[in-house]
């Protein structure tokens, strides 16, 4: 309770200081600091279903998590997560909350029509990252490697154009992240913790930003990359199944590098997995998978380091938010955003992860430490000033796993707190994503 209370105080201080700065003309470039949102109390078609789902998970989730066999449990958790995320988005309405999220002038779908030749796009991608010149990519496309744009170009090419298919893909893949985290924990010997954490993975407050932001998609891809590596590393010997799982995990992890530059920091997570499993060979196999993805993009004409260097320049160009958003505020207010994403239960669980007397599973400590260190590095870098409620989702799902250590008798109360927070945020604020 103390940790959750401190986190709540941090959020309140960030809000008060943020409003004070806005009143003095400081360019935070958010309307409801520390979150990217507008104050707009509202209800929508997702209101009643979201409340019903929350009640069902609160009342039945912990019991089902303890009693169901593993595969049916994962299926139920996946379905409930998708339903929860979609209903939260529908509180803003189908058009505003789902269809339009990725179609604004700064989002990926804006530039999809520009891509008439994928090979040429990859070969010249870095030439269009810098702003203030004709032919520059729009903000989100420029700020990410080309893999992100390729996802939505691919949807368009297979006959699924527009905002709705793109949004639903992000919701479906992003909502599976909690299941991937549970698979990882179980593979590495922490099934009890995985089961206890699953209901919290469903009522994840961060689901607000999974539905809908492309970072939700990135979260799912990264999480399954880690899960596959864990499955491969947990095998008693490096047989064909272990090789296949580790290699597939490596390919997904390599793919994340070309979805978001910031996910280079996620390289700490596979290290945590192989340390927990004590299987260095699996990391070598996964590394080969990562290298294969890097090689494919390089052969197509895009070199990751060149793109990242151009992004760093654009981030601080005149007119860009990175230049004017004050580091002195965001370096700590970003952590307040993370507290909202995790919710009170996530914060309380995280405290237990790093309390030795709670006897947390070794794998949980390693994964949470890796995710926490990644967040710290991203925060101090100055490249994550604001909007981290979506940007840090790939790390937040691993920090949330600490909820598996909360006392079972308190699970329903903590789940209630998670649901109430998510519903309040989504009903009182119109979030940007």
Image: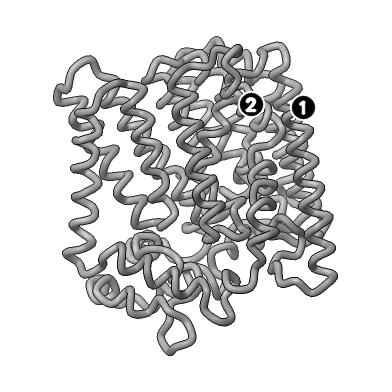
Report whether 432 appears left or right of 221.
right
Instruction: Tell me the quadrant of the picture where the C terminus can be found.
Output: bottom right
- Disc 2, disc 1: CB below 8 Å? yes
Residue position for label 2: 351
Question: Where in the figure is residue 407, as x and y percent of width and height?
Answer: 67, 14
Question: Where in the figure is residue 84, as x and y percent of width and height?
Answer: 63, 39
Which residue is nearer to you in this view: 413 or 331? 331
Residue sitting at 76 percent across and 22 percent down? 413
- Residue 312 placement: quadrant: bottom left
Question: Where in the figure is residue 98, as x and y percent of width and height?
Answer: 60, 57
Tag 2: Cα neighbours inside 10 Å, few (<14), some, or many (≥20)?
some
The colouring scheme, among rainbow, by chain, secondary structure or one colour, is one colour
Q: Is residue 15 above or below residue 196?
A: below
Report whether 296 appears left or right of 397.
left
Q: Is residue 304 above or below residue 27?
A: above
Tag 1: Cα neighbours inside 10 Å, few (<14), some, or many (≥20)?
few
- Residue 6 placement: quadrant: top right
Residue position for label 1: 2
Q: Secondary structure at mark 1?
A: helix
Instruction: Tell me the quadrant of the picture where the N terminus can be found.
Output: top right
Residue sitting at 25 percent across and 19 percent down? 235
Question: Where in the figure is residue 81, as x and y percent of width and height?
Answer: 56, 35
Q: Is residue 395 above or below residue 314?
A: above
Q: Specify whether residue 205 is in view.
A: yes
Q: Specify whether residue 74 is in view.
A: no
Q: Secondary structure at mark 2?
A: helix
Q: Is residue 41 above or below residue 393?
A: below
């Amino acid at each position: 309770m103390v940790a959750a209370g401190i986190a709540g105080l941090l959020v309140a201080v960030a809000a008060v200081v943020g409003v004070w700065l806005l009143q003095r003309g400081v360019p935070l470039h958010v309307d409801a600091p520390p979150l990217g949102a507008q104050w707009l109390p509202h209800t929508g078609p997702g209101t009643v279903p979201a409340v019903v789902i929350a009640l069902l998970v609160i009342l039945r989730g912990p019991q089902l998590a303890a009693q169901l066999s593993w595969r049916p449990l994962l299926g139920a958790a996946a379905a409930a997560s998708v339903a929860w995320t979609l209903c939260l988005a529908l509180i803003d309405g189908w058009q505003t909350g789902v269809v339009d999220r990725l179609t604004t002038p700064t989002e990926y779908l804006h530039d999809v029509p520009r891509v008439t030749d994928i090979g040429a796009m990859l070969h010249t991608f870095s030439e269009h990252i810098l702003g203030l010149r004709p032919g520059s990519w729009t903000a989100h496309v420029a700020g990410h490697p080309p893999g992100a744009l390729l996802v939505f170009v691919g949807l368009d090419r297979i006959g699924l154009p527009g905002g709705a298919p793109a949004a639903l893909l992000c919701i479906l893949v992003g909502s599976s992240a909690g299941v991937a985290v549970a698979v990882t924990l179980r593979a590495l010997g922490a099934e009890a913790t995985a089961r206890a954490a699953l209901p919290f993975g469903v009522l994840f407050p961060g689901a607000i930003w999974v539905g809908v932001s492309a970072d939700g998609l990135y979260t799912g891809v990264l999480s399954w990359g880690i899960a596959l590596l864990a499955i491969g590393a947990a095998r008693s010997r490096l047989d064909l199944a272990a090789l296949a799982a580790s290699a597939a995990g490596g390919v997904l992890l390599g793919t994340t590098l070309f979805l978001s530059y910031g996910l280079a920091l996620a390289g700490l997570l596979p290290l945590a997995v192989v340390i927990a499993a004590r299987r260095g060979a699996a990391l070598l196999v996964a590394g080969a998978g990562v290298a294969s993805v890097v090689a494919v993009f390089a052969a197509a004409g895009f070199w990751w380091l060149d793109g990242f260097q151009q992004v760093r320049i654009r981030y601080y160009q005149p007119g860009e938010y990175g230049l004017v958003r004050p580091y002195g505020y965001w370096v700590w207010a970003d952590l307040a955003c993370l507290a909202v994403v995790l919710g009170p239960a996530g914060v309380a669980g995280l405290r237990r992860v790093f309390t030795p007397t709670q006897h947390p599973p070794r794998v949980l400590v390693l994964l949470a430490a890796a995710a926490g260190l990644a967040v710290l590095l991203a925060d101090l870098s100055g490249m994550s000033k604001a909007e981290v409620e979506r940007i840090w989702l790939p790390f937040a799902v691993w920090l949330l796993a600490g909820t598996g250590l909360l006392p079972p008798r308190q699970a329903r109360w903590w789940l209630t707190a998670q649901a109430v927070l998510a519903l309040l945020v989504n009903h009182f604020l119109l979030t940007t994503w």
